[in-house]
Image (spheres, rainbow, N blue to C red):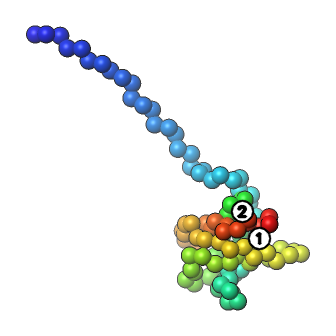
Amino acid sequence: MKPQLVQISPRPVPQRVSANRRASRRFPTAQRAFIVNGDERLCVCELVDMSAGGAQVRITSASELPEMFDLLIAGDTYLKTVPVEVRWRGGDRMGVQYLSDGVCA
């Protein structure tokens, strides 16, 4: 019987996937906001956290919401309207991505 040469190469180790895939740091907040569509106010909500690219929103009513809407953020001394798109939904929360320069612009 003729000996066989077998080349053994190490298996690639899978890269650990981070649970946080966000490009921007999140900042916790309890900011009051409204979900609006044009002149129509759809529901009241609370911003759970915000980042440069989006926000996590807690919805206070169980109404059906469109995939794109405006988020009207009500601060102590300002109102800011930001167009957003829903990226995920779960229970009474959803993640939205800003479609403009976000709340800083």
For disc 1, the neighbor class at 10 Å (few under 14, some 14 to 19, many from 20) is some
Task: Give the residue pinned by disc 1.
Answer: 31
Q: Left or right: where does residue 58 sit relative to residue 19?
A: right
Residue 65 occupies quadrant: bottom right
Front disc: 2 or 1: 2
Rendered location of residue 71, percent (x, y): 70, 76
Q: Which mark is residue 8?
A: none
- Residues under numbered marks 2 and 1 in contact, where contact means CB atoms less than 8 Å apart: yes
Task: Give the residue pinned by disc 2.
Answer: 50
Measuring 67% from the left and 67% from the top, which residue is drawn there? Answer: 98
Can residue 81 be seen in this snapshot? yes
For disc 2, the neighbor class at 10 Å (few under 14, some 14 to 19, many from 20) is many
Mark 2 or 1, nearer chain start: 1
Measuring 86% from the left and 75% from the top, which residue is drawn there? Answer: 78
Q: Left or right: where does residue 5 sit relative to residue 96?
A: left
Total number of numbered discs in the rendering: 2
Residue 13 occupies quadrant: top left
Q: Residue furthest left?
A: 1
Q: Quadrant of the N terminus?
A: top left
Rendered location of residue 87, percent (x, y): 57, 66
| Disc 2 residue type (three-letter) | Met
Measuring 13% from the left and 10% from the top, which residue is drawn there? Answer: 2
Q: Quadrant of the C terminus?
A: bottom right
Observer-nearest residue: 19 or 7?
Answer: 7
The alpha-carbon separation of the residues under discs 2 and 1 comes to: 9 Å
Rendered location of residue 50, percent (x, y): 72, 62
| Disc 1 residue type (three-letter) | Gln
